[in-house]
């Protein structure tokens, strides 16, 4: 390999964090085509991670490096959400250990993950959801945080909490969600209003509004519930609970709730 080509590759690799991945698509944009990338592989500068994806030799990619690659090199509309986003914003102190070992990724629609990401055995249990939870993209509903030097896009606190409620499917989940909601004292009512109006999931909206009112957050008083479509009929959410007559969902009995 010529010294000029080696210098070019060195320049590119210096831009990469040790936990990040390198796609052929990105290399091609930088003038390194597949044939040249194969020479880098044979020379030991790169190692193959998956089809069309490489890692710098000697480095071990992390899940967040994979997410960084999905977002910045492939421009996929995928973000870190739910419990993981809350953890990254310092709001995960109520979570059980098994949830801390999971990573939740979301997209708002039928976006498939490339096989090199979905088939890889990451250190953490990475779970991906694409539920079309919202009818449109809401400004300020996502933010950026750095994980070990890599900026990744995550849900805002407001959006993350709605994603958490989407994942609830049993009493334990609802109990955890209630504890998480207690700590969310600074949510933005304008953003919440827009998210709730665009949310397609009746259970999520009813459960969110019930929790906010039961806890007594000041921002909840600024929401215009009349503009939020809450559907019709009763919803069975909490087994062995009681029916909340305002939101027509079964919720924990008063005596089973934490003091708020």
Image (tube, grey):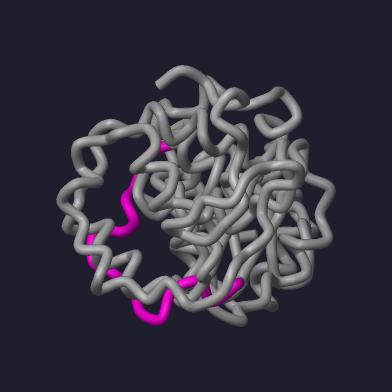
- The magenta segment: 131-146
Counting from the top left corner in percent of width and height, residue 235 is at 62, 64
State yes or no: residue 140 in magenta.
yes
Counting from the top left corner in percent of width and height, residue 251 is at 59, 45
Relative to residue 116, is residue 83 drawn left or right? Answer: left
Relative to residue 230, is residue 227 drawn left or right? Answer: left
Q: Quadrant of the N terminus?
A: bottom right
Figure quadrant of residue 174: top right
Q: Nearer the viewer, residue 16 or 150?
A: 150
Q: Nearer the viewer, residue 207 or 13?
A: 207
Counting from the top left corner in percent of width and height, residue 173 is at 67, 41
Please say whether residue 211 is visible from this viewpoint: yes
Please say whether residue 154 is visible from this viewpoint: no
Query: Residue visible at 75% across and 46% down?
Result: 239
Relative to residue 159, is residue 59 drawn left or right? Answer: right
Counting from the top left corner in percent of width and height, residue 151 is at 39, 45
Query: Residue visible at 69% across and 34% down?
Result: 99
The dominant secondary structure in magenta is: loop
Count the labels in the image. Answer: 0
Q: Quadrant of the C terminus?
A: top left
Q: Nearer the viewer, residue 183 or 99?
A: 183
Query: Residue visible at 66% across and 68% down?
Result: 37
Q: Is residue 257 positioned above or below 156 on the image?
A: above
Q: Is residue 258 positioned above or below 248 on the image?
A: above
């Amino acid at each position: 390999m010529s010294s000029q080509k080696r210098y070019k590759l060195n320049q590119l690799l210096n831009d990469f964090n040790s936990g990040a991945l390198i796609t052929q698509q990105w290399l091609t944009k930088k003038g390194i085509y597949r044939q040249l990338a194969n020479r880098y592989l044979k020379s030991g500068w790169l190692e193959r991670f998956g089809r069309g994806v490489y890692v710098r030799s000697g480095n071990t990619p992390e899940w967040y490096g994979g997410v960084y690659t999905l977002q910045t090199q492939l421009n996929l509309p995928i973000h870190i959400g739910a419990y993981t986003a809350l953890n990254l914003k310092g709001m995960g102190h109520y979570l059980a250990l098994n949830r801390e070992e999971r990573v939740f990724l979301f997209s708002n629609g039928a976006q498939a993950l490339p096989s090199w990401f979905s088939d890889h055995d990451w250190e953490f249990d990475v779970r991906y959801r694409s539920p079309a939870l919202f009818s449109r993209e809401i400004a300020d509903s996502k933010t950026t945080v750095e994980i070990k030097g890599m900026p990744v896009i995550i849900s805002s606190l407001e959006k993350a909490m709605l994603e958490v409620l989407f994942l609830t499917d049993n009493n334990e989940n609802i109990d955890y969600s209630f504890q998480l909601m207690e700590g969310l004292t600074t949510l933005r009512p304008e953003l919440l209003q827009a998210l709730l109006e665009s949310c397609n999931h009746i259970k999520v909206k009813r459960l969110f509004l019930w929790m906010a009112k039961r806890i007594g957050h000041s921002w909840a008083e600024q929401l215009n519930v009349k503009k939020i479509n809450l559907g019709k009929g009763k919803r069975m959410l909490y087994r062995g609970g009681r029916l909340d007559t305002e939101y027509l969902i079964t919720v924990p009995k008063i005596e089973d709730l934490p003091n708020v």
